[in-house]
Image (cartoon, rainbow, N blue to C red):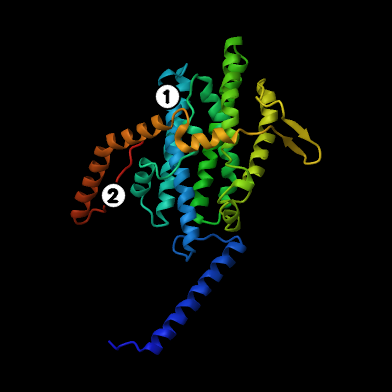
């Protein structure tokens, strides 16, 4: 081993800086060329941090989102509806797992992300802090909440980070099924008795505005938007996606025989899109701050599910250990299994 002279150290630092610049240039070129960034590729720290924040929030939303609908599984009006709803809620658990796995490729463990969720240090979508008061809410969530999620997520299939983009392809296919089941459920209610029709209308009235808020704050108030778009994590602005969603919903509401609770929705000839009324951003901020109708309940239930699932994780870890010890057996299920409620 030879000692490094001061001169050599300076030269080494200069080489390091040149290598960093070359890596940054290669990253920028890959993003500009619409190539995918893969886990082993060099990426700026801020890009990695931004992806972890977004993917964690997305994964958390999938598993917290199971709660409002799971609330209706035991009260679904028929065996068919129960089977559909159970399949849907299970899909959401699966979406959470794909996304936690995709986030792990960035060097963050699922355990760490769940700890942050349980400690209230990472967010999930505010929409899940609203209660599901009637059976029609299951339809309104499928039609509007899953519908808004698809509008947001289809462009993520082309996101610059490979594992996230690939996870989104499968998720979006399942979300389309969710949206259709919600629409079909609302259609059955809307064409049912006057009381059923009224129940469907009431659910749409309550879920419409929170669904529009799912696209996030207006473009001029959105903290992360510009950078995410430059990195091609995000492909369209919040307001663009929101307006696209309104355009999709207007004819569907008409076909359902239901009214969207916004008298200001009208066709804008110049834009070739719909205008819509003012959103109450104070409500959005309040729910975000933790003051929504179900914030505490959702987090408490999530923590409880995690604690009650401890035995599953322990059993999976013990099983994996035993198999790792035995020669000739591959260590199956090396990862502890997260039980979801
Ligand atoms: Fe989902
Ligand atoms: Fe869904």
Q: Which residue of the protein is positioned furthest toward the right in this rendering? A: 270
Identify the residue at image location x=60%, y=46%.
221
Q: Count how many numbered circles sit on residues in the image.
A: 2
Q: Is mark 2 on a helix, strand or loop?
A: loop
- Side of 280 where 58 appears, left or right: left
Which of the image's four quarters has the C terminus?
Answer: top left
Instruction: Residue under label 1, please give it.
Output: 71
Say which of 279 and 160 sits in front. 279
> Which is nearer the N-term, disc 2 or disc 1?
1
Q: How crowded is mark 2: few (under 14 residues within 10 Å), some or many (20 or more)?
A: some
The disc label shown at residue 332, or none: 2
Position in image of residue 319 (x %, y %)? 22, 45
Say which of 103 and 216 sits in front. 216
Q: How crowded is mark 1: few (under 14 residues within 10 Å), some or many (20 or more)?
A: some
Identify the residue at image location x=57%, y=65%.
30
Placement of 251 over or under 110, stated as above or below: above
Residue 188 visible at all:
no
Q: Quadrant of residue 179?
A: top right
Mark 1 near ligand 2 (CB under 8 Å)? no
């Amino acid at each position: 081993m030879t000692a490094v002279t001061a001169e050599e150290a300076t030269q080494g630092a200069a080489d390091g800086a040149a290598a960093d610049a070359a890596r940054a240039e290669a990253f920028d070129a890959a993003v500009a060329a619409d190539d995918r960034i893969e886990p082993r590729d060099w990426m700026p720290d801020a890009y990695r941090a931004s992806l972890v924040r977004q993917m964690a929030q997305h994964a958390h939303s999938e598993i917290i989102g199971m709660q409002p609908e799971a609330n209706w599984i035991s009260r679904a009006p028929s065996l068919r509806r129960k089977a559909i709803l159970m399949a849907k809620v299970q899909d959401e658990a699966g979406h959470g797992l794909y996304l936690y796995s995709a986030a792990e490729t960035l060097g963050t463990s699922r355990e760490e992300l769940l700890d942050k969720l349980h400690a209230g240090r990472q967010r999930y979508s505010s929409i899940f802090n609203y209660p599901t008061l009637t059976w029609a809410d299951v339809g309104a969530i499928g039609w509007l909440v899953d519908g808004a999620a698809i509008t947001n997520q289809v462009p993520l299939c082309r996101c610059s980070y490979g594992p996230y983009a690939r996870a989104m392809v499968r998720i979006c296919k399942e979300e389309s099924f969710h949206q259709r089941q919600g629409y079909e459920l609302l259609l059955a209610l809307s064409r049912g008795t006057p009381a059923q029709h009224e129940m469907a209308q009431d659910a749409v009235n309550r879920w419409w505005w929170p669904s529009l808020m799912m696209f996030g704050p207006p473009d001029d108030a959105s903290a992360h938007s510009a950078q995410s778009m430059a990195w091609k994590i995000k492909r369209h602005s919040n307001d663009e996606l929101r307006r696209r969603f309104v355009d999709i919903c207007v004819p569907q509401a008409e076909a359902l025989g239901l009214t969207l609770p916004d008298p200001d929705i009208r066709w804008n000839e110049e834009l070739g899109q719909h205008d819509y009324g003012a959103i109450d951003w104070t409500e959005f901020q309040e729910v975000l701050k933790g003051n929504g109708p179900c914030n505490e309940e959702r987090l408490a239930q999530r923590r409880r599910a995690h604690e009650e699932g401890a035995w599953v994780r322990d059993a999976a870890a013990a099983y994996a250990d035993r198999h790792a010890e035995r020669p000739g057996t591959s260590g199956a299920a090396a990862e502890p299994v997260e039980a979801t409620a």
